[in-house]
């Protein structure tokens, strides 16, 4: 189990106040990591308390990651609070569900700014620090729509395809510098982003019928994978997009 031990590591997780981000943050804390959680809204006192109860340090940064000018401050605050960054989890994201013919420019740019642009520029900023350290783990959150087209989500699909490209490009450049860059592609997860889908009886039935596991994923389902990719257990993994989807992509 020592391979999965994150004691003494500092993890920066975006979109961490709730949902998948909160779940992954707790998973990393359970494995021993201290946390910096980035949120666009009011900080989560409950999540902070849960992390502290595990004996870990935690610091919250409030920032609009869709605004590129705020990204350097996120890194600066993290370094001031924790002294280093060993793990970056780029999880923050939004989705806009509109048929492609009606997809507005504002929706397109909002999705791209947060789901794609912030991923690259945070990787770049944190990567510079990791290059100085000679080590680091970057985990980008992709999607099964990294591999598929989806329905009524052209901006989201394009961004998630781009996340895979960024992951592979950075892995090529940084693997030799001691930095592992990989991604997790969650399947259909029970989060706020999928509330409308789960409430649509017909669509919910169609989705469940396609998932071999027969259920929607939960936030706990990502805890093991994120700890694996953040730990020494995955030191020879570079540029991989790991599907955690109940078998969706195998169907």
Image (cartoon, rainbow, N blue to C red):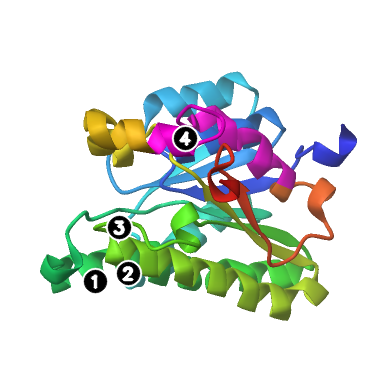
**What is the distance, in whole Å, between disc 3 and disc 1 at their CAs?**
14 Å
Quadrant in which the N terminus is drawn: top right
Nearer the N terminus, badge 1 or badge 4?
Answer: 4
**What is the distance, in whole Å, between disc 4 and disc 2 at their CAs?**
22 Å
Question: Left or right of 11: which side holds 190?
Answer: left
> Which residues are the magenta region?
207-228
Mark yes or no: residue 209 visible. yes
Residue carrying label 1: 109
Q: Residue 215 magenta-drawn? A: yes
**Cβ–Cβ under 8 Å for marks 4 and 2:** no
Q: Residue 36 magenta-drawn? A: no
Residue 118 position by quadrant: bottom left
Residue carrying label 2: 112
Q: Nearer the viewer, mark 3 or mark 2?
A: 2
Q: Secondary structure at mark 4?
A: helix
Main SS of the magenta part reads helix
**Cβ–Cβ under 8 Å for marks 3 and 2:** no
**Cβ–Cβ under 8 Å for marks 1 and 4:** no
Residue 112 in the image, given as x and y percentages of width and height: 32, 69
């Amino acid at each position: 189990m020592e391979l999965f031990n994150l004691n003494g590591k500092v993890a920066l997780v975006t979109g961490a106040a709730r949902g998948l981000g909160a779940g992954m943050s707790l998973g990393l804390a359970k494995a021993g990591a201290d946390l910096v959680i980035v949120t666009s809204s009011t900080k989560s006192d409950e999540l902070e308390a849960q992390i502290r109860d595990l004996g870990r340090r935690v610091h919250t940064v409030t920032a609009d990651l869709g605004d590129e000018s705020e990204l350097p401050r996120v890194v600066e605050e993290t370094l001031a609070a924790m002294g280093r960054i060993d793990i970056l989890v780029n999880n923050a994201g939004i989705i806009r569900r509109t048929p492609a013919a009606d997809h507005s420019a504002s929706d397109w740019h909002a999705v791209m700014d947060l789901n794609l642009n912030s991923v690259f520029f945070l990787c770049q900023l944190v990567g510079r620090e990791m290059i100085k350290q000679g080590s680091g783990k970057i985990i980008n959150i992709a999607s099964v729509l990294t591999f598929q087209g989806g329905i009524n989500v052209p901006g989201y699909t394009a961004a998630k395809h781009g996340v895979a490209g960024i992951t592979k490009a950075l892995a090529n450049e940084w693997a030799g510098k001691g930095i592992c860059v990989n991604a997790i592609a969650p399947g259909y997860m029970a989060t706020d982003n999928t509330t409308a889908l789960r409430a649509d009886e017909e669509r919910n039935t169609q989705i469940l019928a396609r998932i071999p596991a027969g259920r929607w994923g939960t936030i706990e389902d990502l805890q093991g994978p994120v700890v694996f990719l953040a730990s020494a257990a995955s030191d020879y993994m570079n540029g991989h997009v790991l599907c955690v989807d109940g078998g969706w992509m195998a169907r």
